[in-house]
Every structure is written in structure tokens, then in C-alpha cells.
Image (cartoon, rainbow, N blue to C red):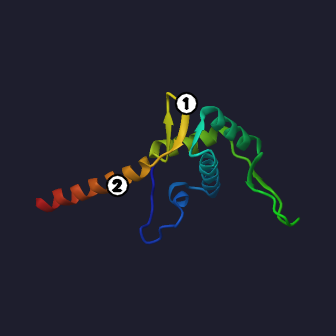
Amino acid sequence: MVILFDQFNLPDDIFKVIFATEQQEVVAKMLIKYMWENKGEIGKTEMGLFANKLHEGSAVIKESGKSPLESEESMSYNKRQFYDRILTPMRGMGLIDYDLYSKSYKVSDKFNKMMIKIGLMWLREIERKGKK
């Protein structure tokens, strides 16, 4: 996945940097929230249930409040697009890790480590060009 950003107009929210649409941001935030509610790890079955809830339109974005004006909000998102546009890119970037043995998804810090590695690659490139 390609991340394009402007260093002078960098948003405060990481999801705004990574995802192209507001709907993708919302779904990604919902997924991460769901994972944190389950101690940062969910199984393959739970991921499938989460994707099905999105597909059916029964995934709740906002709980209903005490006031009658604060109604519950739900979201619908295509299951295939969830896997293609949300989960797969998040796995590829290292935001989420999948363990083949335990068949579980975990929130990961690999994204941060890769960003540091990319920054170091750029510093090496600057040093190499500066010596010529």
C-alpha cells in the first residue's frame, strides 16, 4: 500500500494518513477498537464474525445515548472490500499481525519499526550521495 502525506499538513489521526476514504477510516478504527476490547487479539472466527456484521449492516458505530435524540448508528461495509481494503493493507503494513499457528490476529508494533527502518534507509541514501 502506498502512503502519501504532506509533512506540513499531517493529520493527528493515523487512520487519516493511511486510508483514502472516511468510511475506510471508520471501519479500521472499529476493527482496532474491537481488537483492543479483546486484549489486542482476536481469532480467525471472530474476524469473520466482525466482517459479517459489517456486511449485514449490523455493526454499531455509536451506541444509543440516554437522550432520545441520541440514536444508535450502524454501518454497512462489503465483506470482500473489508478484507481487500482494510484488513489486508493493515496486515501488509504491520499494523495487525496474523499468527498461522494460533490462527489469530494481533495488534502489532511492526508498522512503527518499519517506519524507523525506512527513515534509516533515507539517512543512508543521504550519506551515500553526500560522499560522492
Residue at the far left in the pictured view:
132
**Residue 3, quarter of the rendered image:** bottom left
The front one of 98 and 118 is 98
Disc with the residue nearer the chain's start (1 vs 2): 1
Position in image of residue 66 (x %, y %): 84, 64
Q: Which residue matches tag 1?
A: 103
What crowding class fits label 2: few (fewer than 14 Cα within 10 Å), some (14-19), or many (20 or more)?
few
Residue 62 place in picture, x, y as percent? 74, 57
- Dividing the image into 4 quarters, which one contains the C terminus? bottom left
Tag 1's secondary structure? loop
Foreground residue, 31 or 130?
31
Q: How many labels does the image show?
A: 2
Q: Is residue 66 above or below residue 85?
A: below
Q: Is mark 2 on a helix, strand or loop?
A: helix
In the visual, does 83 lie left or right of 69? Answer: left
Q: Residue furthest top?
A: 101
Quarter assignment of residue 47:
top right
* In the displayed structure image, the side of residue 1 where residue 71 appears, left or right: right
Residue ranking furthest to the front: 39
Q: Give the side of residue 89 with respect to residue 71, left or right.
A: left
Q: Position of residue 103 (x, y in %)?
A: 55, 30
Mark in front: 1 vs 2? 1
Which circle marks residue 72 in the picture?
Answer: none
Q: Residue 116 carries which label?
A: 2
Picture residue at 38% right of the left edge, 54% below the top: 115
Q: What residue type is labelled 1?
A: Lys
Residue lying at the far bottom in this picture: please name it. 8
The amino acid sitting under disc 2 is Ile
Cα gap from disc 1 to disc 2, whole angstroms = 28 Å
Crowd rating for badge 1 (residues with CA inside 10 Å; few <14, some 14–19, many 20+): few
- Where residue 52 appears, as percent x and y from the top left, is 71, 38
